[in-house]
Image (cartoon, rainbow, N blue to C red):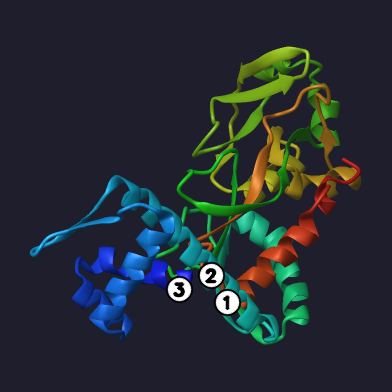
Amino acid sequence: MDRLQAMQVFAEVVKQGSFTAAAEQLDISRVKATRCVNALEEWLGARLLQRSTRRISLTEAGQQCLRQCQQMLELEEELQSSLQQADQPPRGRLRVTASSSFARAHLAPAMADFLARCPQVSIDMIASDDTINLIEQRVDLAIRISGELDPGLVARRLAPCRSIICASPAYLAQYGTPQTPDELSRHNCLTYSNFGKGAWRFERPDQPQLTVPVSGNFSANEASVLTEAVLSGIGIALQPSYLVGPLIREGQLVPLLSDWQAPELSLWGVYLSRHHLPASLRSLLDFLIERYQGTPDWDRGC
């Protein structure tokens, strides 16, 4: 017995609700469909289907077997697809989305390097700070920054994403340098208008998480705008290291409260399904993981 074929027939019978419909869908005879299911039951030593003249239904053993058969068939399809693509260079168009700040600072140059490696792929980039619906916008890959993703999403972790509290040398010369998180309440703190506007959270290994109320005379909904504002010397900001890391290394910004850290987030590559992953998307994911693995460039030296 071809056990994979028997599993396929069994799953199709359940899906179609009859042996006749399953046989037509698989382009085999009804007799062969019946023999396949009978042989699967004999091999497993359990009845999988309750049959009557009007309908079929799954037994308890059949319900368990169906889940495992579906997993085996998906694995077989994925293996076949990957082997068929192994000798083919990645090709085709990919729609990729990321926040405006990350797309501008890091993803655009990364895509240039990726396209040099895979010249038969083309990229359609959507830079947006809105959470885009991957299905509605036909997006192949979304680069998102989050602590924990919805468990229903399919994703691969690309890199850590730290946040650093910082200010310009000019601001600190005029208003002083805070030595503890509590002192931030006496400073002009530049915040995001859509989250974390009234409080910043910090943690340290020897103490529980600390929430500090903050306020200031400037807020924005986009990270690059806040970075420009803190560079201008009007206040203190809590910013992603992928934006301020290079500025700290150059001395344009000064990191503050080095004993305290904001809760670390992660950079994720989110996509629709693990099954039948195009070679172009698989190559792009592998490229980004290779590029950002370990300590990303923006975190080195800051």
Q: Residue 88 versus residue 80: which sits nearer the camera?
A: 80
Q: Residue 247 versus residue 148: which sits nearer the camera?
A: 148
Q: Residue 113 versus residue 278: which sits nearer the camera?
A: 278
Residue at (70% x, 45% y) in the render: 227
Residue at (35% x, 52% y) in the render: 46
Residues at marks 1 and 2 touching, judged by CB atoms closer than 8 Å: yes
**Disc 2 element:** helix
The image quarter in which residue 264 lies = top right
The residue that mark 1 highlights is 80
Q: Residue 177 versus residue 37: which sits nearer the camera?
A: 37
Q: Earlier in the sequence, mark 3 or mark 2?
A: 3
Residue at (49% x, 51% y) in the render: 153
The residue that mark 2 highlights is 76
Answer whether residue 232 is visible to the viewer in this image. Answer: no
Residue at (76% x, 38% y) in the render: 233
Q: Residues within 10 Å of mark 2 (few under 14, many from 20)?
A: few
From the image, which quarter does the N terminus lie in?
bottom left
Q: CA distance from mark 1 to mark 3?
A: 20 Å
The residue that mark 3 highlights is 1
The image quarter in which residue 11 lies = bottom left
Q: CA distance from mark 1 to mark 2?
A: 6 Å
x%, y% of residue 43?
43, 60
x%, y% of residue 245?
81, 45
Amino acid type for the residue under numbered disc 2: Glu
Answer whether residue 90 is visible to the viewer in this image. Answer: yes
**Disc 1 element:** helix
**Disc 3 element:** loop
